[in-house]
Every structure is written in C-alpha cells, then in structure tokens.
Image (tube, rainbow, N blue to C red):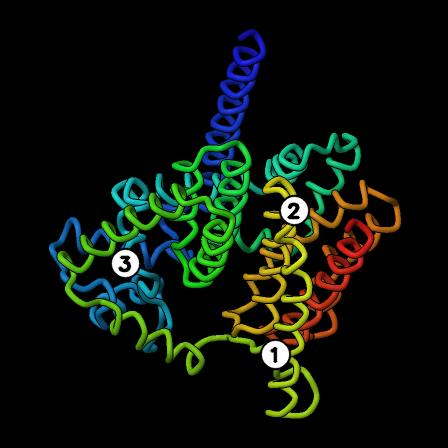
C-alpha cells in the first residue's frame, strides 16, 4: 500500500514538472517566433484545414481551394499544387481537436513547446522504462545532443512538425504495455497515426501485440479507430482518394528521398537492397519474439524504425528524428560504454557534416537519408548481437 502511494505521488510530481516545462517552453516559443504573424509551420495546414471544417462548414479539407488559401497565408508567390495541404489522414481532426480550436498563436506555441519538452524528457523516460539508472552526466550529454546537436530535432521544434509527438506515443504505448495499461497503450497508438508513416509503424506494433495476445489493447484500438473513421466518412464523405492524390503528387513538388536508390545497380540494386533490409529485419525480429514485453518492444520498435527509414520514400529529411529511438536503445544495451557513446554522439552530430558536404535533400543529394539509418542500423545490430 505504501509503495503504491509513493509511486502515485512520484507520478503526480512528474506530471506537474512536465506541464510546467511545457508551459515555460510554450511562452518561450511565443516570444521566439512571433507565431501570430507567422504561418510558415508544418502544423499550419492541418490547423487551417480542420478549422475550415468545424468553423466554416467546409466538407473537404483536402480541396484545392483550401490548399490555395493555405499557401496564401504562408505567403507563396504563386500556387503550387500539392505543396502545402491538409494531406494527413482525416482522424487527425478529432485526435488533436483542442489544438485546432485554439487561436493560432496559442495553438502553435503550445504545440512547439510540447515538442521541445518531449525532446528533453524522452531520453530519461526511455532509460527509466528500460530499468537503466543512466548516469546523470551521460543523460545530460545524450539529451543535449539529441535535442540541440541533432539538426533535425531543431527543425521539428522550429517548424511545428509532428515527428517527436509520434515517437513519444510509440514510447508511451511501450511503457503502458509493460505496465499492463491496455487502454493507455491503445490511445497512444491512436495518436501515433496522425502521419502515414506513424500509422505504418503503429500498425506493426499492433501486430506484435496481437501475436503476443494483448487482445484488449488491439480491440480498444480497433474500436476507437473504427469510430473515428466512421465519423470522418459521415462528416467528409469518402476522403481517401482526396488524400492519396496529393500524396502521389508529392514527388513532383517537394523534396523527397528514396534510400534504396543510393544503392549501386539502378533498379536491380534498389530491389536487392530492399530485399536485404527485409531479410535483416526478419533476422532481427524473429528471435526477439521470445523476449518479455519490457525488452521485446524497444528492440523490435527500433528494428522496424530503421527498416522503415531505409526502404520507404521519405519526405524531406525530417523523419530521421525517428532514429533517436534505436540510438537510445543501443546506448542502454551497452550501458553507456564509452565507445558506444562516442559512436552515437558522432551519428547525432553527423547531419552538420552532411550539410557541410552538400549531402542533404535541400542540396538535392540525399546521401544523408541513406547513411544515417545505415549507421544507426549497424550500431543497433552490433548491440543486439552482443546483448542477446
């Protein structure tokens, strides 16, 4: 009884600290970027599109008319099809509804403040979830490097992206599963579906939970998602095609990368590389099935993330934020050994080197999209082999 009370008190304190940091960083963001006059955030198309549905009576947030209006607000000189639009699956209108109904300046400040808070607390949450009492100095170095030195983390914060929010919900689902909280695990995986790749990886986690007989989590997730989809179809009609058309046209207007294309051998090389990564993922995942939830979920999630980053097309370079999870898991498995720490820190700093060499998507050279997950996968594989 006393132990339960202490744990509950610790949880209340932790939540209080988290909310305080969130509020502080939201205020900092409001003063940093003056968001009331600035709509150049990835968050804006979803905010604007949802408000058009709920407050203006629009029946289609994916329409070219709303896309034109979004680009006008973002001060585009001319309309560019598929450049900035609603794009994401329609259930995002309901899962993040409080943010959409708030005025823009408040909403974006809270959203970006949340992202910065998550970057600063997730390394600690991962170490606690794994039962690792990480040395304070190492925690400080890893947190600082993951948040401020890893260039894509700052992009996520400064441009109001969704990536760290999705990654946080994968981690929350993992924690909830190991603490026998199926409803919380299911809700976290609902939030993780706000972007298409988040839905793909969340689906992989659900399949793993199904195989391990976590039926309650899968049933709750299915019930909630079915309700959200039904509500969206009632409100918007059949929106799937409206989402897929601009998604297919994304390559024509925006920066994208296809990592297998960096493998030598043209089309044949792409196929060989993809098959190799699938084989690697299977070789990693199959023996992981025997592990308890506490270690199976972080290892399998890390493997799935690396495989996704290597075989799926990537929009811009932002999705490399997901590589933070397998890097943190590798550090845990090595218990912060100095050599592993140096290698992980080198990967975290490497985006600046790629930027200096011109090996980035903005420079129309996507080597970074290939090399960062490759090196992350090598580190993960070595430590899985040693740990297992």
Residue at figure coordinates x 63%, y 63% from the top left: 306
**Residue 42: x %, y % from top left:** 42, 58
Label pair 3/1, CB-CB below 8 angstroms = no
Residue 294 found in image quarter:
top right
SS at circle 2: loop
* Above or below, comparing residue 143 to residue 319 in the picture: above
Q: Which residue is mark 3?
A: 90
Label pair 2/3, CB-CB below 8 angstroms = no
N-term mark: 2 or 1: 1
Whether residue 158 is visible to the viewer of this picture, yes or no, is no
SS at circle 1: helix
Pick whichever, 353 or 30, lies toward us: 353
> Which numbered disc covers residue 128?
none
Q: Which residue is mark 2?
A: 291
Give the mark toward the camera: 2 or 3: 2
Pick whichever, 154 or 321, lies toward us: 321
Q: Cα distance, mark 2 to mark 3?
A: 36 Å
**Residue 49: x %, y % from top left:** 25, 58
Q: Which residue is mark 1?
A: 274
Residue at figure coordinates x 40%, y 43% from the top left: 217
Q: Residue furthest right?
A: 339
């Amino acid at each position: 009884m006393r132990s339960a009370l202490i744990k509950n008190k610790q949880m209340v304190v932790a939540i209080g600290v988290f909310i305080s940091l969130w509020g502080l960083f939201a205020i900092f963001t409001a003063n940093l970027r003056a968001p009331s006059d600035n709509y150049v955030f990835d968050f804006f198309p979803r905010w604007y599109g949802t408000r058009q549905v709920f407050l203006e009576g629009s029946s289609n947030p994916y329409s070219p008319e709303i896309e034109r209006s979004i680009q006008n607000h973002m001060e585009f000189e001319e309309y560019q099809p598929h450049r900035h639009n609603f794009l994401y699956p329609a259930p995002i209108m309901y899962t993040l509804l409080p943010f959409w109904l708030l005025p823009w300046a408040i909403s974006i400040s809270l959203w970006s403040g949340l992202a910065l808070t998550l970057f600063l607390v997730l390394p600690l949450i991962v170490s606690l979830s794994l039962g690792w009492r990480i040395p304070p100095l190492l925690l400080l170095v890893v947190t600082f490097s993951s948040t401020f030195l890893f260039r894509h983390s700052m992009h996520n914060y400064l441009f109001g992206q969704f990536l760290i929010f999705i990654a946080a919900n994968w981690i929350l689902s993992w924690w909830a599963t190991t603490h026998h909280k199926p409803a919380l695990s299911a809700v976290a995986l609902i939030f993780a579906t706000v972007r298409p790749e988040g839905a793909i990886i969340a689906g992989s986690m659900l399949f793993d939970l199904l195989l391990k007989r976590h039926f309650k989590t899968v049933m709750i997730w299915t019930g909630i998602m079915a309700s959200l989809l039904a509500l969206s179809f009632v409100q918007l009609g059949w929106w799937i095609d409206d989402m897929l058309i601009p998604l297919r046209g994304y390559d024509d207007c925006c920066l994208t990368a296809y990592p297998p294309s960096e493998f030598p051998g043209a089309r044949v090389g792409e196929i060989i590389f993809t098959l190799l990564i699938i084989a690697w993922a299977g070789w990693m995942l199959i023996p992981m099935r025997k592990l308890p939830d506490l270690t199976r979920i972080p290892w399998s999630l890390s493997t799935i993330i690396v495989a996704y980053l290597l075989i799926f097309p990537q929009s811009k370079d932002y999705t490399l934020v997901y590589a933070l999870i397998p890097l943190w898991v590798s550090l845990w498995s090595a218990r912060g050994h100095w050599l592993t720490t140096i290698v992980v820190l080198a990967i975290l700093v490497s985006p600046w080197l790629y930027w200096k060499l011109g090996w980035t998507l903005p420079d129309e050279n996507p080597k970074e999209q290939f090399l960062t997950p490759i090196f992350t996968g090598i580190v993960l594989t070595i430590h899985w082999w040693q740990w297992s």
